[in-house]
Image (tube, coloured by chain):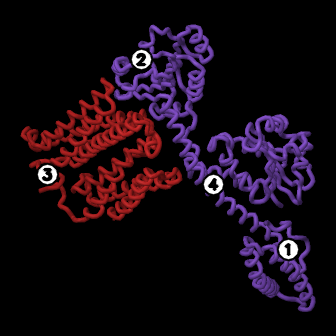
Amino acid sequence: MPLFWLRFALVLYGVGLVYAMLSLWGARQALSRVALPLVGLGVTFHFVALVENAMLSRTWAPSSMHELESLLSFLLMVFFFAIYARYKATAPGLAVFPLVVLMTASAAFTGNAAEPPLPLFVSVQWIYIHVALIFIGYSAVLFNFVASILYIVEERALKTKAVGGIWSRLPALATIDEIGYKSLVWGFPFMTLGLIAGSVLAEARFGSRYFLDPKIVLSILMWVVYTVLLYTRWSGGWRGRRAAYLATFAFVAAIVAWAANNFSQMHRFIAP
Amino acid sequence: MTFHLIGVNHNTAPLEVRERLAVSEAQLADAVRLLVEQPGVDEGMVLSTCNRVEVLASTRQAADLRAYLQAYFRVNTDSLNSHIYEFQESAAVRHVFRVASSLDSMVVGEPQILGQVKEAYAIARSLGAINSSLEALLSRAFAVAKRVRTETAIGSSSVSVASVAVNLAQKIFGSLKNKTIYLVGAGKMAELAARQFLARGAGTILISNRTWERAVDLAETLGGRAIAFDELYQAAEQADIILTSTGSAEPVFRKEHAEVLSNRRRGRPVFFIDIAVPRNVASEVNRLEGMFVYDIDDLQSVASNNTAERQKEAERAEKIVELEVERFALRIKSLEVVPTILSLQEYCETIRQAEIDRIRGRLGTITPEQEAAIDAMTRGIINKLLHTPITTLKSAAAEPEASTIQEMIRRIFNLKGNTNSGKPEG
């Protein structure tokens, strides 16, 4: 049943994706009146799927890669709607919807196998909190990245005086800037607390050798980049190209840290 | 019932003629009252803006709206004939739709006209001059205008230099609230643009000018602050938008100024609007991060691009209007057969009642069940008999032969009254 809801959510996200693509070709507001509520409905079903899945497996701890993908894409959608509620900006959807559709599809169509549950060394609630916090941080990094790309694109359009056409549908430059900055500010405490929670867990399980694991080194590197990014925005008012380079770096670091599960001896989403 | 419209607009009549025909807001009620007193006029409204004066009526029989113009404005309509346009039936419907959708406006797509039509409608309505048919027409016109606005981008781009500048500023800064505008040079153009910025909620205005008195004067009228030319570069640090229009032969803002400016502002964007010729802002400034420079040519080319864009959107809007005119005509025609259907049903019901009354005497006492059965049976027969003629009427309503079929049915059943619709639509 959770997979059923998830697939249903996937179809609705697909509507959002099509809408996002059409809006580039000049689709009108009429479409957004239908598409966005549908995507919102998708988020609701996605939530149902997550809860039901947790209830069925009798644990809150995500036990497979696919469940993690599902959780992350859910958080990304929540982030998207939070930004939409505040700025009425749908442009980030251009980058977020494809990613969400991909991850949800992966979770919805390949995640059915009864994978062995995570070996429960430590309190499962703590694992879940760790994962959720970090994922909110990941979402913030992604949205910051998307915003800085949009910033560069729009800045270029304004400078080359190519203000008509599809770029005229982007939100104002200041709005994009604020979305990026606010994403960072809001994401930072989550990312930090998530890493702390993870460290506490690992310390309890493995002791200090855990901190030499590639996954952990990369995660800390990502956090440092994140902090630098936040600092330059906050103190130096970095915008445009320089901010975008850093944002790209932070985003790549986040992806590498995520992918590092495959090299890590200790940090595995799935039990070996 | 037919629609009838007469009027002048900016295309057909010069300003002097429109002035003579303009109806002030205070006189509008009288104008409408006189209109509905005209022989043949059932419902009416009058629209008067600076670009058009139009009289719209729903008429039972041919009405002479030119006579009304003559009576109300006390002008000789012969002298106006070359300026006046007159539309009937679906041509009038089309015109009302086009006006409300701002397709007939001087600046196509400008948003005020819809509000003006709504106002004229509200006044006529409050006087009881609008009933079902104009109500149907106007509410459809508002819906069409809304459709045009949401489905085309007709009103989304600005076509004057000043409004292009304001829109660009909004594209950069989002809201203009709390933004500071610095006028370097206080000419007429700068003042006009500043007023546009103020109208969109700009916060502070700073003004510098070669003649100090002019700067002080303008600062007073705009509620801004005058800045001496020596303090130009310090003051510029506070400004988000800098509008230059001095007669200086050399650029006032060069790359080195802009670099300092950018540092002092910690990277916050600056929008230079340079309407001076020769230019007051060096073109390298545009290459610096966060600095946006638009000179008069840039603004003009955006404006003319937008004009072309609007033209394209207007063509799409015309198609929507055409579709809606057809749809509206269908609806009106399908309403025309309603009286015939009603009197046909009434006629049969009278016969049925009479027959039941007649047979009741002969049947003696019958149970309520039997009575109900008789009632149901006779009703059933009539409904079945009428089913085909009624559906034929309804489906023929849109066809040209509607009035012929209607007339035939009326004659066959000897129905009283006429077909209500008057003459068939041509």
Inter-mark Cα distance, 2 to 4: 48 Å
Inter-mark Cα distance, 1 to 4: 40 Å
Q: Is residue A61 above or below residue A163?
A: below
Residue at horizontal 36 percent and vertical 52 percent from the top: A97
Chain identity of mark 3: A
Q: Nearer the viewer, mark 3 or mark 2?
A: 2
Residue B343's tag is 1
**Which residue does the numbered mark 3 point to in the structure image?**
A262
Q: Residues within 10 Å of mark 1 (few under 14, many from 20)?
A: some
| Mark 1 touches mark 4? (CB < 8 Å) | no
**Amino acid type of the residue that numbered disc 3 sits on in the rendered structure:** Asn
**Which residue does the numbered mark 2 point to in the structure image?**
B237
Residue B117 placement (x, y as % from top left)? 73, 44
Which secondary structure, mark 2? Answer: loop
Looking at the colours in the rendered structure, which chain would you say is drawn in purple? B
**Amino acid type of the residue that numbered disc 4 sits on in the rendered structure:** Glu
Inter-mark Cα distance, 2 to 1: 80 Å
**Which residue does the numbered mark 4 point to in the structure image?**
B318
Task: Look at the image and give the colour of chain A.
Answer: red
Chain identity of mark 2: B
Tell me if residue B125 can be seen. Answer: no
Chain identity of mark 4: B
Q: Is residue A95 above or below residue A55?
A: above
Residue B188 placement (x, y as % from top left)? 60, 21
**Amino acid type of the residue that numbered disc 2 sits on in the rendered structure:** Glu
Chain identity of mark 1: B
